[in-house]
Image (spheres, rainbow, N blue to C red):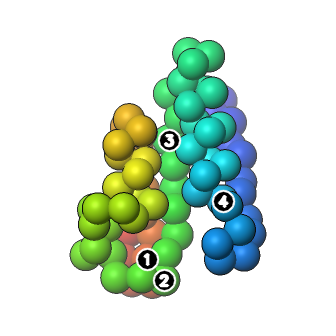
Amino acid sequence: MPKMITFIGLHNAGKTSLIRKVAAELRNRGFRPGIIKSTKHNISDWERKGSDTWLYRQDGIEHLVLAGRDTIL
């Protein structure tokens, strides 16, 4: 059964930094973490350099779901 960890916090609280560290540790322990990220931003910008989703891809996250207001990628 897959396990899930949820991170919730205010804007600029450090959620992405923490998630990236946790994901790296999980990968070091042999897991293959995936990320589900909700956003209020335009999903067409999901691969913009420096965005959270771009950072997750750079970190080697294979399974990434981006959920927007009207779209899920």
Q: Real-space Cα distance between discs 2 and 4?
A: 16 Å
- Give the mark nearest the N terminus, 3 or 1: 3
Q: Position of residue 15 (x, y in %)?
A: 66, 59
Q: Real-space Cα distance between discs 4 and 1?
A: 18 Å
Determine the secondary structure under disc 1: loop
Question: Which amino acid does the dot numbered 3 rest on?
Answer: Gly
Determine the secondary structure under disc 4: helix
Q: Nearer the viewer, residue 69 or 61?
A: 61
Q: Quadrant of residue 46?
A: bottom left
Q: Is residue 48 left or right of residue 27?
A: left
Q: Real-space Cα distance between discs 3 and 1?
A: 17 Å
Tell me if residue 73 can be seen: no
Q: Is the N terminus in the top left, top right, bottom left or bottom right quadrant?
A: top right
The residue lying furthest to the top in this view is: 30
- Give the mark nearest the N terminus, 2 or 4: 4
Q: Which residue is mark 1?
A: 68
Q: Which residue is painted at 51% across and 49% down in the image? A: 35
Dot 1 and dot 2 residues touching (CB under 8 Å): yes
Question: Which amino acid does the dot numbered 1 rest on?
Answer: Gly
Q: Which residue is mark 4?
A: 15
Where 67 sits versus 2, above or below? below
